[in-house]
Amino acid sequence: MKQFSKLLVGTAVGLALALGAAPSYAATPDNMLVIANRIDDITTLDPAESFEFAGSDVSRNVYGKLVNFNPLDLAAGYEPDLAASWEVSEDGKTITFTMREGVNFHSGNPVTAADVEFSLRRAVILNKTPAFILTQFGFTPENVAETIVADGNTISITTDKKYATSFVLNCLTSTIGGIVDMKTVMENEVDGDMGNTWLKTNTAGSGAYKVLSWKPNESVTMQSNESFYQGAPAMERVIVRHVQESATQRLMLEKGDIDIARNLNPEDVAGASKNEDVAIDDELRGRLMYMSFNQKHPELSKPKVLLAMKYLIDYEGMQNSFLNGQYKIHQAFLPRTYLGEIDDKPFTLDIEKAKGLLAEAGVSDLEIEVGVREAQERIEIAQSLQNTMGQAGIKLNITVGTAKQILTRYRARELDMYMGAWGPDYPDPQTNAGTFAYNPDNSDEIKATGFLAYRNAWDPGDMNQAVEAAVIESDRDKRAAMYEEMQRKHQMESPFAVMYQKIEQTGRRSNVSNFTVGGAITAASYWPVTK
Amino acid sequence: MASPTTAKEGRQLSPFVSKSAAFTSSVLRTLGSILITMIGLLFITFLIGRVMPIDPVIAVLGERASKSAYDAMFIEMGLDKPLLVQFFYYLWDVAHGDFGISRLTARPVIDDVMRVFPATLELATLGTFIGVFIGVPLGVLAAVKRGTIIDQIIRVIALVGYSMPIFWLGLVGLLVFYGLLDWVGGPGRLGIFYVDLVPTVTGLILVDSALDGQWDVFRDAISHIVLPASLLGYYSLAYISRMTRSLMLEQLSAEYITTARVKGLSEWTVIWRHAFGNIKVPLITVIALSYAGLLEGSVLTEIIFSWPGIGSYITTALLSADMAAVLGGTVVVGLVFVCLNIFSDLLYKVFDPRAK
């Protein structure tokens, strides 16, 4: 057995030597930002196609746009970016942008109006998932030659009818508004794809960073653009590492191996916040949690029953227990920080009031089915609703299923009640108003399943006109007031009970400043970050 | 005169020709079996992919895609064709080396697999080495010391290895060895300072860094792999040591062992040359199965340690209905099993004279 002992000792010594060789660093370098995030949703880097959270983060830091949000003052709304200024025609249909001088792409090519013309036309012609953000203004592959036109240092875009300027400009701040380097992209065109295949995995922008490498499910590495027109970023290199687990992110953050942890769960937030080298930032995001009621249901279509339902939600209880730190009570269809937002909270849990309303409506022994996707927090919310509704004599049957199962039934108007989430597509109030409060044709045949109002078989009546009016109102303040009024009416009359708005909790090393995940309206910005 | 000579040569050649024919037939049988296995595997995976409650079009376009965009993608993905036709189109492409483009990574599946499989191969190989070099001696020791405290301790070690959730053990391992003691590197294959420093030759960072003479990178890679590999090695060890113990006990109770002892052979020779010599063949199967299991990718270990291996690749692809990636990964896993089986058969022939 001596040989066996020698073998064990040899193995142990070998392992110890290997372990002892591990290098140790107290913190990341001062000119480098290391972020842990779940980046497995990135499927493309092409701004004409990218429509996911992690992809939007990359795009925001790589591509300049005509107008953009200032990360340090998101509340200010859009500001000039690659466009130095713009003018709106008298009929309100044409916006002419004058390009900023002296801005170059990462390739060294100058950013011109022709690049903008190419980028916006390209997004419409390729017609990828986010293309609707542009095509809702009447742009089609057939008419872009006339509607998106460069002329010297200016670029004009002409919409099919008059829209609020703020609506058009807000949409241009979306990822799809990213301006690509036409020359570089077309050098990489394959079979007339306008460079789509190449841009899926490469970048050609003018923003603060250029992508050095994207390894799917592994990392994105970015290098600063030293000639960025706003000045070279302090962080010369940004590395976003895919770290799936919250507990692993926390360990890395507390140890100083990363600067930012994007996906900490409430337990890890609580644990990490005890570390004096770590700070926790809360930012409201755009996602809303809501429930809605099918208006084909004979009882659920009664206004007093709808009102009763909104008093049967334990808003505070859920916020302070299993949703703690993840969601904040919000009861209107526009997320906080959007133009026209309101913070009215007319509903609280009030079983007796709900019982009274149900009695006035002549409803008793109600039994309904709610469809919920298989996500833990949604199931827990449904269980809470089951409990509170039960106290008012309503039997709630919970059907849990996959996204396909539940959404198929929801779109087919088969569910009595739906409990789920909705995230805005672009940073303008129309994105939510146009779905929560708009449904111009409620007939079954039309199958307008893109409208949430349609999915619930709800005819919003004169709210349709209100939505159409708000979308063409040029005066920003008047437009905001229109949405405020619309939401107050919607709160009381619609079959939607908006309950919560998502909070994103980010852990960061306390020496890191000026990092923002983009609030409810945009994505993360790395260029203002300092250490 | 010519005929007898020819007849004689014919008689002399006959055993060679017969051996050669037998060899050719054996190779053809093996290749045929591999082909049928792979087609069957692909067909079953393909079917599962089609009956999963995930809409592959929505997985690509998102929930808010317009009906026209949905219909166009439905046709582009070939979903309008009968299932068998879809499968034959896929087989045709695979036969031409085209595994398709992953919808999730926008890259050819073959490139993805070449990127993620070496990460798993490196981890599984090291894990298996640890499992074998510790598990086999422990199993032998437990058998030799049967019923003693040493045997009990080794059995408890194996039992813990079987029953402890790897998810929990991985997190605790990270907390202790990375978080508190600072003995090992954190999650990922390399620290941020060493990423992309070594040119990719094999995809195995330990090998590539050694080939390039980048010993700093090599040490960093060791510090990152040692913990997940030890974890996998522990699970492998638990299985291997239990099986080794059981196989050894069977041999140690055989009459030829008593005879060997009566003849005055040393205990070392009795255990290692005679008893252990006779368990090599079944042990090869045990080790090969354990290795194959690790090569499929240990999804939880890969998630905890942010290890970009084939397990998490296939799982992510499956959950997103990225069937080209799932099928590509399945081909690799299937091939791994087939190759390990062939390798085991070859080792049988080396260690078992009856199989020659």
Image (cartoon, rainbow, N blue to C red):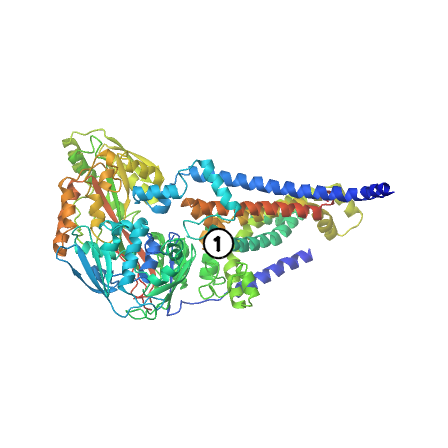
Percent position of residue A381, x then y = 29, 42
Q: Which residue is mark 1?
A: B111
Mark yes or no: residue A331 visible.
no
Give the quarter of the figure containing the C terminus of chain B.
top right
Displayed quadrant of residue A280: bottom left
Q: Residues within 10 Å of mark 1 (few under 14, many from 20)?
A: few
For badge 1, the amino acid type reads: Asp
Viewer-nearest residue: A60 or B187:
A60
Mark yes or no: residue A148 visible.
yes
Q: Chain of mark 1?
A: B
Viewer-nearest residue: B301 or A473:
A473
Check the image and report above or below for A474 versus A29. above
Residue furthest out toward the front: B1
Percent position of residue A144, x then y = 26, 53
Give the quarter of the figure containing the N terminus of chain B.
top right
* Left or right of residue B210, residue A466 in this image: left
